[in-house]
């Protein structure tokens, strides 16, 4: 069953080309989250990486602490904490502190660790990362929700009479989510622990195909653990998007950046097994379109989101993959187009407005006649002479209205004789130009 309201957010790895000033790159990330908060986006998830040169946020918790001071409403999540890299007690303790500092705006996302180079530097055996994440998450949840001291010993961490000084601000705990890629491991772990899901590989061929069947792994794991059925509102799907006034413009905006992102980073640097070189940015854009990416106009995005909901069976939040494929102004405008013209339609926040407009338009003659009679009565009650003068004025107004009806597009004056405001054009022309520049705070 499709959730009633689809939330929107971003998944910020982040991705920054090498050779740029890293300090300024991080500032742009903070500015973007402030911009999204102004636009009404619901969530932002921040990654953790330690090598590779492109994904330069080492501690999502520290970043969230700064971003929280610059925002008011947007919820901020770790996307994700690589549990095998940390003692679970530290993960729980830091997140509870953030929960209090943000007055309940944080979310904990966890994963096994994405980059083999990170695990190599920390001396972690890659084949054990998923089981370590599973074990660590179970202890993190216990620390956040249980009152009794916990003693626990494994070959990679120990606890002795451990309990947190602070309980979470959000009770019983903050929202939890587990990263899921192509294997069932993420979905299974989420179902086992009663957590939500971050599907972070949805925009690959394999990831899009897996959306149709992935949720059942979560349901089965929850059932095996004796937990209630998971809620699809807690399922977040990551998908790249870039919007413009036409699909051609959108593709042209991102061609160069998209090609570098794919060929230089995913293929040339980390050697992703699900990526391969593209000969041009246009080829790469068309490939992503085939895999569900939202590249084009707001109308294209609305149709694409509805297709994703049908393929998946329904999810609760669409997370745009934060990227810098286009120039800064184009990127900021893309997010504003999403907020102004896509989110309201998908969230059904404009249908009642349109219905009200249609009702007034369809009944304007009756409504105006009633208002005119009310004016005449008020004038008559004042004096007979005023009535005669008003009758002449009303005849002139009626003549102008008849002339306006015969000339479509000519505004009809109001009862006081003042010209009515001109009508907004229909279609794409109704979309006011977005002011470019630095995000407004």
Image (cartoon, helix red, strand yellow):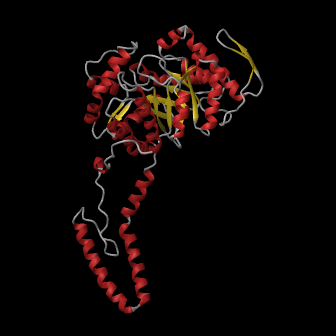
Is residue 175 shown above or below 206?
below
**Residue 228, located in which quarter of the rendered image?**
top right
- Nearer the observer, 81 or 221: 81
Say which residue appears at 31% left-offset and 48% top-offset.
433
Q: Is residue 224 visible?
A: no
Residue placed at 62% from the left, 24% from the top?
Answer: 91
> Relative to residue 218, is residue 409 depicted above or below?
below
The image shows residue 23 at horizontal and vertical percentages of 43, 28
Q: Residue 371, percent across and down?
A: 40, 75
On-image quarter of the C terminus: top left
> In this orientation, does residue 426 appear?
yes
Please tell me how many numbered marks the rendered image carries. Answer: 0
Side (left or right) of 35 relative to 171: left
Note whether 435 is above or below 386 in the view shown: above
Indicate the position of residue 50 as horizontal and vertical percent values.
Answer: 49, 18
Q: Taking 164 as reference, is 289 left or right?
A: left
């Amino acid at each position: 069953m499709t959730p009633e309201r689809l939330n929107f957010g971003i998944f910020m790895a982040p991705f920054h080309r090498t050779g740029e000033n890293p300090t300024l790159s991080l500032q742009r990330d903070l500015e973007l989250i402030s911009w999204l908060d102004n636009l009404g986006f619901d969530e932002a998830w921040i990654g953790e990486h330690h090598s590779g040169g492109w994904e330069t946020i080492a501690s999502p918790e520290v970043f969230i602490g700064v971003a929280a001071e610059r925002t008011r409403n947007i919820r901020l999540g770790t996307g994700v904490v690589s549990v095998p890299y940390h003692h679970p007690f530290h993960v729980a303790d830091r997140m509870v502190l953030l929960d209090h500092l943000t007055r309940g705006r944080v979310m904990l996302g966890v994963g096994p660790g994405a980059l083999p180079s990170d695990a190599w530097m920390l001396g972690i055996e890659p084949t054990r990362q998923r089981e370590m994440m599973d074990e660590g998450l179970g202890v993190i949840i216990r620390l956040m929700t249980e009152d009794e001291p916990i003693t626990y010993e494994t070959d990679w961490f120990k606890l002795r009479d451990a309990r947190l000084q602070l309980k979470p601000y959000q009770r019983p705990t903050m929202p939890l989510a587990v990263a899921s890629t192509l294997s069932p491991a993420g979905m299974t772990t989420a179902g086992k622990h009663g957590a939500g899901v971050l599907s972070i590989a949805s925009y690959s061929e394999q990831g899009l195909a897996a959306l149709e069947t992935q949720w059942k792994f979560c349901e089965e794991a929850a059932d095996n653990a004796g937990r209630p059925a998971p809620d699809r509102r807690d399922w977040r799907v990551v998908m790249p998007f870039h919007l413009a006034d036409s699909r051609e413009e959108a593709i042209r905006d991102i061609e160069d950046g998209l090609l570098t992102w794919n060929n230089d980073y995913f293929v040339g640097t980390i050697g992703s097994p699900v990526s391969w070189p593209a000969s041009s940015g246009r080829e790469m854009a068309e490939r992503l379109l085939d895999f569900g990416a939202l590249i084009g106009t707001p109308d294209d995005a609305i149709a694409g989101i509805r297709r994703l909901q049908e393929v998946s069976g329904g999810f609760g939040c669409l997370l745009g993959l934060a990227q810098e494929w286009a120039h800064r102004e184009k990127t900021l405008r893309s997010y504003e187009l999403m907020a102004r013209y896509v989110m309201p339609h998908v969230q059904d926040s404009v249908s009642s407005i349109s219905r009200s407009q249609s009702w007034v338009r369809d009944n304007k003659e009756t409504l105006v006649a009633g208002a005119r009679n009310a004016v005449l009565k008020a004038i008559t009650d004042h004096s007979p002479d005023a009535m005669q003068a008003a009758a002449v004025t009303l005849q002139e107004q009626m003549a102008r209205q008849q002339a306006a009806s015969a000339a479509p597009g000519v505004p009809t004056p109001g009862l006081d004789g003042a010209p009515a405001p001109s009508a907004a054009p229909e279609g794409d022309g109704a979309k006011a130009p977005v002011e470019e520049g630095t995000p407004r705070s």
